[in-house]
Image (cartoon, helix red, strand yellow):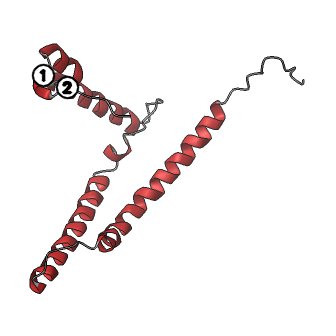
Amino acid sequence: MVRPVLHLADYTDHEMYASWFVLEDKQRIKGDILNTLKLVKDGKFQGCTRGLEKLSDGGRTRERRQVSIREVLEEQENQRKLHKSSGGSIVYDMAKFRKAYKPHSRAARHVAHAVGKIDEMAAACQRVDIPRIGKKRKN
């Protein structure tokens, strides 16, 4: 579905304030996240930490992302050099980009699959058997 939206210049001050975080909001949210991470690290947090995984891995997620971007950009540069030497217009080989990125996406794919399984098991534990109207329950 497509909906028309106002151009940024057409927002009132109230609409701007209601639509985006201001600096104080960002600082408060960051503080809340840091406090939550500290509680998780100390084993004192029992709530949901979904979405905070990448913040508690010591920067490995960011490092992996930077390496994957660098390798794709290197492949792009290699393709530019190849086409520059041939004098023709460049048409990128997307298969080579996929090949450069695939080893880096593998870990994320496995993590996402594992998290999905965890969510599936948690949802199964929370299911409640609700009797249907008009049907008698067996005891």
SS at circle 1: helix
The quarter of the picture where residue 78 lies is bottom left
> Residue at the spot x=19%, y=27% of the render?
27
Amino acid tagged 1: Asp
SS at circle 2: loop
Q: Nearer the viewer, residue 21 or 12?
A: 12
> Residue at the spot x=61%, y=42% of the render?
121
Q: Nearer the viewer, residue 8 or 26?
A: 8
Q: Which mark is residue 6?
A: 2
- Say which residue label 1 marks: 10
Q: Position of residue 125 (x, y in %)?
A: 65, 34
Amino acid tagged 2: Leu
Q: Nearer the viewer, residue 124 or 14?
A: 14
Q: Which mark is residue 24?
A: none
**Horizontal placement of 89 versus 110: left or right?**
left
Q: Position of residue 118 (x, y in %)?
A: 55, 44
The quarter of the picture where residue 131 lies is top right
Label 2: few (<14), some or many (≥20) within 10 Å?
few
Query: Do callouts 1 and 2 mark residues in contact (Cβ within 8 Å)?
Result: yes
> Residue at the spot x=52%, y=46% of the render?
116
The N terminus lies in which quarter of the figure? top left
Q: Is residue 24 above or below residue 70?
A: above
Q: Is residue 9 above or below residue 78?
A: above
Label 1: few (<14), some or many (≥20) within 10 Å?
few
Q: Position of residue 6 (x, y in %)?
A: 19, 25
> Residue at the spot x=69%, y=26% of the render?
128
Q: Is residue 94 above or below residue 12?
A: below
**Horizontal placement of 13 versus 136: left or right?**
left
